[in-house]
Image: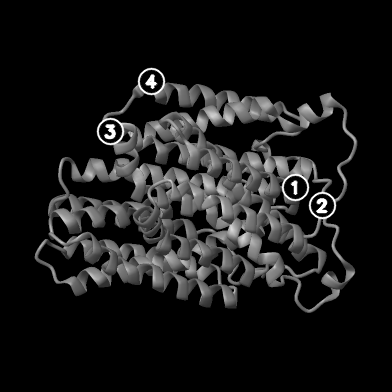
Amino acid sequence: MTVGKTTEAATEPVGDAAGRKPFPWTFTAPLLLGSTLNPINSSMIATGLVGIGVDFHSGPGTTASLISVLYLCSAVMQPTMGKLSTLFGPRRVFLAGILILFAGGVIGTLAPAFGFLLLSRALIGVGTSAAYPTAMAMVRRRADSVGMGVPSRVLGNFSIAAQVTAVFGLPLGGILAGAFGWRALFAVNIPLALITFVATLLGVARDTPLPRRDRGGLLTSLDLPGILLFAGTIVSLLLFLSGLSAPNWWLLGAIVVLAAALFLWERRASRPLIDVRMLARNRPLQRTYLRQTLVALGIYATLYGTSQWMEQSAHLSASAVGLILLPLFGLSIVIARVVSARGWVRWPLILASVAMVLSSAVMLLITSDSSVYVLIGMSLLLGFTNGFSGFANQATLYVQTPADEIAVASGLYRTFGYIGAIFSSSLIGITFGQAATDSGLHALAWVLGGLGVAVLVLTVLDRSIPTVAGK
């Protein structure tokens, strides 16, 4: 989060600023599409790992690196792309990210060796990471230009788009891989990138011309040492969290050293990537990031943990598990639409934590002999958590962050979500051990309940969270 105010402003047509629809579909559609490309690429690849392993004679451990490399690149690059948008303009960085995605799609489609797939996934992670933080910056810019306050419906649309992606990512990947082979999972990014690029050129106003900067001034503003230290800290943290079942303790030492170096450097930098002074003062924003991490940890751990348990202990087929979880996503979409339409913030966060606690209570009562209807009920409760928290956390971030810092702050918001998601895999491994048993599910339920209580306390005691967005 940069200290100085951004010099980039919108070149908005007067008619747009004065019109009745400050956010027409021509503006929001490419931003929404771009923002979904990262999560959809995260989930699609799962359906092609077996085929990739066969073609390149690679085992499951090797092919799984295609998932982790995207997560690692995304966690680092989300706030970095936000930083770049403050220097070069959010629309320019958004478009540059789409071009990087296009290159990643081409390389993955034509990859002659496994190493090219790793490069492709890294480029896809970098390119798609530009979309969300820059989209938030452009939304904020447009809202401020018309004096709108918090654009609840627009933020709700981003939350809903994420829910839809979660529903259709795996099925879409299965259809593409089944019909055209695993290369289609990379090739699909080519037309998606072209559509998003053209739609952005036509529907999103240009950034103002770049100011003249000498080379030294640009390098200082870019804060390359801060970016490198942030990357080292986040990568070390994610690698440590992903292997807690057999911890690499030297990584913990690396995290401490790198984090300390990052803090000391950013305190002295004139244009830091992470404004640690502001973040230290902004306690509400700290709580929002923590709440985002805890909610992501709870949702992903429950989602993937119960999926494994339903297949291994309840002996349900993969398709049956998918049908049981489908109401979760459907309810999330409906709730996100209702909450965002009314701009509710505080009560949805409270209800999300309550739903998480109730989900854990149901999990404690479940055994391998439980009725499918009980499993669906648990899925619906998790849907309440997902739907209530998505828009509300995003809106809270929006009101807690100055306009010139929204891009980096939004990127960090995604990074903290990745931390929770990756931590969830270790949590599942610790609670389940070698097999997904009833006792392991109940242990996971106790953790979920603790997370729900923690989120509830963070919300109830935080008086800075508005009841309604913008109020």
Judged from the image, the secondary structure of the residue bearing numbered disc 1 is helix
Q: In the orientation shown, which residue stands out farthest toward the left?
A: 369
Q: CA distance from mark 2 to mark 3?
A: 46 Å
Mark 4 or 1, nearer chain start: 1
Judged from the image, the secondary structure of the residue bearing numbered disc 4 is helix
Give, as a three-letter code, the residue at label 1. Answer: Arg
Residue 445 in view (yes/no): no
Give, as a three-letter code, the residue at label 3. Answer: Gly
Q: Position of residue 16 (x, y in %)?
A: 82, 71
- The answer to the question of whether label 2 and label 4 lie on touching residues, with beta carbons closer than 8 A, is no
Q: Which residue is mark 2?
A: 207
Q: Which residue is mark 1?
A: 92
Mark 2 or 3, nearer chain start: 3
Crowd rating for badge 1 (residues with CA inside 10 Å; few <14, some 14–19, many 20+): some
Give the colour scheme shown.
Answer: one colour
Q: Which residue is mark 3?
A: 59
Depth order, front residue of 150/60: 60
Judged from the image, the secondary structure of the residue bearing numbered disc 2 is loop
Q: How many marks?
A: 4
- The answer to the question of whether label 1 and label 2 lie on touching residues, with beta carbons closer than 8 A, is yes
Asked if residue 83 lies left or right of residue 187, the reply is right
Q: Which residue is mark 4?
A: 250
Judged from the image, the secondary structure of the residue bearing numbered disc 3 is loop
Looking at the rendered image, the disc whose residue lies closer to the viewer, 4 or 1, is: 1
Mark 2 or 4, nearer chain start: 2
**In this picture, is 257 found above or below 151?**
above
Looking at the rendered image, the disc whose residue lies closer to the viewer, 3 or 4, is: 3
